[in-house]
Amino acid sequence: AGYGNTHIDSYFETNIKNAIANNMDIGIYWFSYAYNNDLAKKEAQVCLRTIEKYKEHITLPVFYDFEYDSVYYANRNGVRITKARASSYADIFCTTIQNAGWNTGIYTNIDYANNYFSKDVLSKYYTWIAQWTSVCTYSRDYIIWQCTDAKFIGGKKFDLNRFY
């Protein structure tokens, strides 16, 4: 749906309207550039304002994504991301979303699940794990597995996710 605390994905409206028109299961994905707790909260608030009018159609969780580009951005802003900081940002975002009445989760890869998010935070929310292999080796619970970034449909490249 968007990223940071000001940017709505330019395709969000079109994509969600088409998903609704085609009776698809709909979830939300928000990419984070937070490098402090206040920014994580603002990102959640912008996300909520963006998706609120579609609430009756969104049946899957609102996922928080914090990864390599998030860490690089924080570094450029003078902040070194630790496990405690990344976990705090994820927890603030997800708690804000959850307190507004939505299901929520964390999209992450195995590296970040092990090195940037505490087990406590990961266990509080749904997990969407990215591991581009033939078998998912992530040992904790997850509801979605992103198994490749190279699924071709009609000559176009997509990520492939398996929802459980």
Image: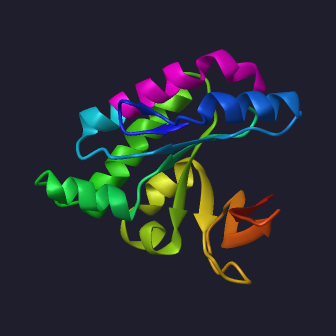
Quadrant for the C terminus, please: bottom right
**In the image, residue 45 above or below residue 80:** above
Q: Is residue 105 on the magenta stretch?
A: no
Q: Is residue 28 left or right of residue 49?
A: right
**Quarter of the image holding residue 72?**
bottom left
Asked whether, in this view, residue 151 is left or right of residue 77, the answer is right
| Residue ID at (16%, 56%) | 76
* Image x and y of residue 119, in percent: 46, 62
Above or below for 98 versus 134: above
What's the magenta bit mostly, secondary-structure-wise?
A: helix
Could you tell me which residue is drawn at 25 percent across and 62 percent down? Answer: 82
Task: Depth check: give the residue in front, 152 or 37.
Answer: 152
Q: Which residues make up the magenta segment?
A: 42-57
Residue at horizontal 59%, vertical 68%?
A: 130
Q: Where is residue 24 shown, x and y percent of the image? A: 84, 38
Dividing the picture into quadrants, the one containing residue 15 is top right
Q: Position of residue 145 (x, y in %)?
A: 69, 65
| Residue at 71%, 57% in the rendered image | 143
